[in-house]
Amino acid sequence: MIPHHVLDDLGPDQRVAVLARDGELHFLVHAAGAAAEQIRAAADRDGSEVVATHLSDKDAILALVAGRERDVGGEG
């Protein structure tokens, strides 16, 4: 589950990238203007796969996370 402080403290010039590593999701807050290549490079350094980037809609992020968690055997 995404930490609520990530969503609640997201500034107007910030976005969320959803990353996956070893079947677990984690999140990267990035600048709204960040290039996709920058986010991919950060994910690569971390050994992660980029699931989605440049997200700002709280409901859409929660739906994406819930769907992915069900896909990997979580609740739901």
Image (tube, rainbow, N blue to C red):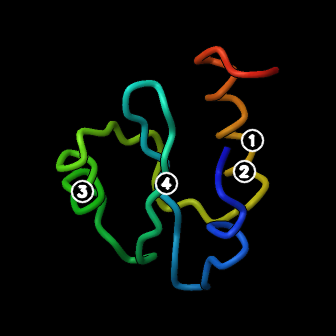
Q: Quadrant of the C terminus?
A: top right
Q: CB atoms at circles 3 and 1 under 8 Å apart?
A: no
Query: Which residue is at the far top?
Result: 73
Type of the residue with mark 2? Ala
Which-is-in-front pick, marks 2 and 3?
3
| 68 is higher (above) or lower (below) than 45 | above
| 70 is higher (above) or lower (below) than 18 | above
According to the image, label 2 marks what residue? Answer: 60
According to the image, label 3 marks what residue? Answer: 42
Measure how far apart labels 4 and 3 are at the Cα level: 11 Å
Say which quarter of the image contains residue 28. Answer: bottom left
Query: Which numbered disc flags the more N-terminal residue, 4 or 3?
Result: 4
Please give the name of the residue rendered at 58% of the width and 18% of the height, measured from the top-left corner: 72
Measure how far apart labels 1 and 4 are at the Cα level: 14 Å
Which-is-in-front pick, marks 2 and 4?
4
Please give the name of the residue rendered at 64% of the width and 14% of the height, measured from the top-left corner: 73
Type of the residue with mark 3? Ala
- Secondary structure, mark 1, is helix
Q: CB atoms at circles 2 and 1 under 8 Å apart?
A: yes
Type of the residue with mark 4? Phe
Q: Residues within 10 Å of mark 1 (few under 14, many from 20)?
A: few
Q: Is residue 1 left or right of residue 30?
A: right
- Secondary structure, mark 3, is helix
Type of the residue with mark 1? Ala
| 46 is higher (above) or lower (below) than 28 | above
Question: Residue 9's spot in the image, x, y percent?
Answer: 66, 79
According to the image, label 4 marks what residue? Answer: 27
- Secondary structure, mark 4, is strand
Measure how far apart labels 2 and 4 are at the Cα level: 14 Å
Q: Residues within 10 Å of mark 3 (few under 14, many from 20)?
A: some
Say which quarter of the image contains residue 55. Answer: bottom right
Q: Residues within 10 Å of mark 4 (few under 14, many from 20)?
A: some
